[in-house]
Image (cartoon, grey):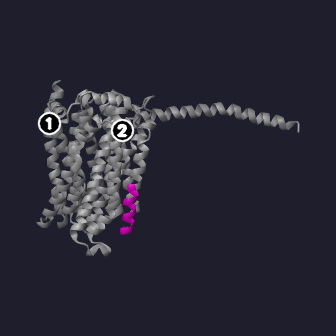
Amino acid sequence: MAEQPHGRTGHGSTAKKGLPGMRQLNDRMSRVWLGWGSKFLPFADVATVDLPLSRLLRLSLIQVSVGMSLVLLVGTLNRVMIVELGVPASLVGIMLSLPLLFAPFRALIGFKSDTHVSAIGWRRVPYLFQGTMLQFGGLAIMPFALLVLAGAGQSGDAPKWIGQAAAALAFLLVGAGINITQTVGLALATDLAPEDQQPNVVGLMYVMLLIGSIVSALVFGATLVNFTSGRLIQVIQGSAMVTVLLNFAALWKQESFQPGHLRNRSAAPQPSFSDSWNRYIAEPHAMRRLMAVGFGTLAFSMEDILLEPYGGQVLLLGVGATTKLTAAFAGGSLIGFALASRVLSRGADPFRMASIGALVGIPAFLMVIGAAPIRSAELFTVGVTMIGFGAGLFSHGTLTATMQFAPKDQIGLALGSWGAVQATAAGLGAALGGVIRDLVSRAAITGPWQPQASGYIAVYSLEVALLVATIVTMVPLLRKRLAG
């Protein structure tokens, strides 16, 4: 009994001696983790005391939901509609371009959310709520509209125009929601961030978009390995619920009540959108910058609805395997975005970065073309990853250039203009890609590959030509920076 207290004391003494060592080890590991995270996680150093990284990451859930919807539309549904449901690729391309009818209004949406006056002091949140509800509504009705469009099951007796109208409405609602939430969400992020960190915060939002795309592509691919119409309904409607949950979590306590401030602000005269736009577009080389964004985005987006059907019809890959290609594309984009962030933070020329991205895309598309005659899924996957890598470099370069050259009081308008041109070009590319693929395939053009590959090859070759045009457009911008 006499030894029992001594034993306890000795055990407690050992524990007390061990605790400082554990604390030191934990502190050391924390410093290493934070150091490596700040060094390699893109834009992780934008966090401040007033705007912690946790709040930024929660706000970026909006971008995660946007990435999920985009993967569902251009990554999974286009393959399912063309291959499993037998919908013509031209009709699929037109349907997938409908969400981007709202793209030209992104600059106007951003401008309106800048000047909006709410009775409770919110400017951005009302637009984000409306966009979320539109996105949810489109996803909720989409699976049934697609089954009617394809004439699946008992809906085969329905008139064709009903399926087309219902599918068009679903895609239009999702597109409106995506454009509103993404534009206003990025504007809210720039509101919260210090002025010198706004471009980096916007970059962080786009990194989270890519991460959302990668995770969603892997989940959709695993869920649809054994494809059935019922499982397709579950996937799309589950995405609708996740969208609402993510967006509402992202908005929680992000924008404060300032009714008095906004009443004073509403009394001051506000510039019209046309005046603000005319002043922005009059900036030197502003139109050429937007043209470069348009050409490059068109070049990188015409294959959006074709890569997975190409893998399925030409390389005979399954639904799960082709859906994972979207993850490979997004992974390449994430690597490109992270590398561009690291290089541009050291003062590199963003136009040169964008030009390098276009140059990388040329051999990448040639790899995809070369995979057809030898039926190499490995070469195809490498090419898709490189396309994503080049697109990441190009997007980050043009985005950074837009932010750097924007007037201080027009950053939101500049960001909306960049997004409007990019989204419009992406929608036009998706539509043109599907139409060109169908027209060339029907012409029965043959070559050293399977006849069904001819339409795809024509689109990829046109994208190579567009990348060359993009580089030529940016040459004067490069010369201007070198001369300065």
**What residue is drawn where x is 31% and y is 40%?**
184
Would you say the residues marked 2 and 1 are in contact, meaning their CB atoms lie under 8 Å apart?
A: no
Residue 247, position in %: x, y? 39, 46
Q: Does residue 327 lie above or below 154 as drawn?
A: above
How far is the residue under mark 2 from the one under mark 1? 26 Å
Where residue 113 sits in the image (x, y, percent)?
Answer: 29, 38
Task: From the viewer's perspective, tell me whether residue 266 is left or right of residue 219.
Answer: left
In the displayed orientation, state which residue is furthest to the right. Answer: 1
x, y percent for residue 156? 27, 74
Front in this rendered view, residue 351 or 185: 185
What segment is highlighted magenta in the picture?
227-240
Q: Quadrant of residue 421?
A: top left
Query: Where is residue 55 shown, x and y percent of the image?
Result: 44, 37
Q: Give the residue number, with chain letter if any, for mark 2.
A: 204
Given the image, on which type of amino acid does mark 1 rest? Arg
Q: Is residue 350 above or below residue 427?
A: above
Q: Residue at x 25, y 28 (%)?
A: 409
Q: Amino acid at mark 2?
A: Leu
**Residue 442 visible in the current orientation:** yes
Dot 1 alpha-carbon crowd within 10 angstroms: few under 14, some 14 to 19, many 20 or more: some
Q: Which mark is residue 227?
A: none
Quadrant placement of the N terminus: top right
Q: Nearer the viewer, residue 130 or 213?
A: 130
Residue found 25% across the figure and 39% down from its top? 416
Circle 2: element type: helix
Q: Which mark is residue 288?
A: 1
Is any atom of residue 376 visible in this view? no
Question: Is residue 149 located in the magenta-colored stretch of the structure?
Answer: no
